[in-house]
Image (spheres, rainbow, N blue to C red):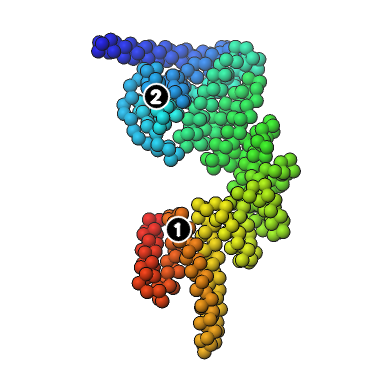
Amino acid sequence: MILAAATTVLSAAHAQTKALDNLNKQLQKSDATVADPKKAGSAGTWVDRASVLIDASNIYTKELIAGFPIEQSLNLIPDDYQEIVEVEVGGVPHKKYVFENYDIYVDGNGLVAFWNTKNEFRPGALDGAFDALKRAYEIDPSITTGKGYLIGQKLYNQFKTDGMNLYNLDRKAEAGAFFGKSAEVNGMLGEVDSVMIYYAGVAYNEAGEYDQALEYMKKAKEVGYDEEGGVDSYIAYILQQQGKVEEAISTLETALVAYPTNNQLVTRLIDLYVQSKRSPDQVVSMLNKAKELDSTNVQLYLMEGSLWEQMGEAEKAEAAFLQATKVEPDNYVGYMNAGIMQARKGDALVEQAQKLDINDVKGYNALIEQAIPHYDGAIELLEKAHELNPKEIVIVDMLKGLYYQKQQEGGPEMEAKFKHYNDLLKSMQSEE
């Protein structure tokens, strides 16, 4: 049995070596063919070159299929892995099977998630295949409806597969380029792949490459892929990142005519209205419309609170922030902002007291007494916010300041609270 197993391994290794030798010979032959001016004028020459370069691009990983069990995958590939490493990708744990020329990432269910080629058999082979097919198409566009169609399909699928692998590896700009080329290949085949165009826009956007992202999002819209306003929302977001706020607003307002119930459009438009200091009546009207469409969207209440705060309407701002805590009790932002509003009320009363005549002790004490409940309310809200998000340094800083005031009259308990938050703040500041 041991001898049989060894024979199988050696046979697989021999087959792989032979396949690599054959591929190398094909590549050398193709190199020579395209160097011949006469042969280079034939569309078929470039289709053949595209085919061999596609093979070179996936020679190590052609047996891998996303979603396939790793144990079965290992039986299909001729190589032995060198080690298995526990890694996190995008915050999700994976097992990385390390091979000489590539790595396979396996999810928690033991399924192949994606892979990465580290050492290409022919560097840049897939891009080379794309250039070759494009050259063939330029010489004879009909080539992709006949001989070149199957090669084009292989190239399209390889760009899509490799693009998803790159996206999962957080190489978003490279993924965007591959998605874009997959769509371009499909265009040469006489088809439109709006999804790949959209994916290219998404990947470029996430990479912070906003010019390319905008180009592909607009292309997606031109070919009829709009996701019922979702693409318009994406375009507006990209424009906002580029500082083109008015153009973003115009995009959203136009989209809302076609999709008046798309709350994503409404929410983004409200954010831009607030940012650009539009008329409060206009923003409030839009907010009310949005809440009718989606009363559970906590961001709407937080935006409303921010709007009222900017307008100097402290009571309305606090009410909106408190409503946000009811809509989403686990969201710390509502508690934090409501706590800040309460603390400001206390600060305003203390400031008023400090402006009184030095002999008006009674008036001073009365204002300080009025401030205390606001500070207590602020502490209660901020403690809740801290419980939900212990890493938010703004909350810790405020609690330190509030307990500093309380410790002067609150005895050992308040002193201990002040010390706790003071020490915590120093610790957090040292880690920044």
Quadrant hosting residue 152: top right
Residue ID at (56%, 40%): 205
Residue 80 versus residue 299: which sits nearer the camera? 299
Q: Report x, y in % for residue 36.
A: 53, 13
Residue 246 against residue 45 in the figure, above or below: below
Q: Foreground residue, 13 or 257?
A: 257
Figure check: 285 above or below 342:
above
Taking depth in this image into account, of 331 and 79 the one nearest to the observer is: 331
The quarter of the picture where the N terminus appears is top left
| 371 left or right, relative to 244 | left
Q: Residue at x 45, y 19 (%)?
A: 62
279 lies above or below 212: below
Disc 2: CA contacts within 10 A as few (<14), some (14-19) or many (>=20)? many
Q: Mark 1 points at which residue?
A: 386
Please name the residue that numbered disc 2 is placed on: 70
Residue type at numbered disc 1? His
Mark 1, residues whose alpha carbon is within 10 Å: few (<14), some, or many (≥20)? many
Disc 2 marks a residue whose amino acid type is Ile
Residue farthest to the right, as pictured: 257
Residue 41 in view in this figure: no
Q: Position of residue 339 (x, y in %)?
A: 52, 63
Furthest residue in direction front, as rendered: 326
Quadrant occupied by the C terminus: bottom left
- SS class of the residue under badge 1? helix
Residue 335: percent from left, percent from top? 52, 59
Give the number of the mark in front: 2 or 1. Answer: 1
Q: Residue 355: in sight, yes or no?
A: yes
Q: Do the residues labelled 2 and 1 touch (CB within 8 Å)?
A: no
Who's the residue at 62% across and 35% down the image?
Answer: 216
Cα distance in 3D space between marks 2 and 1: 43 Å
Give the quarter of the image for residue 260: top right
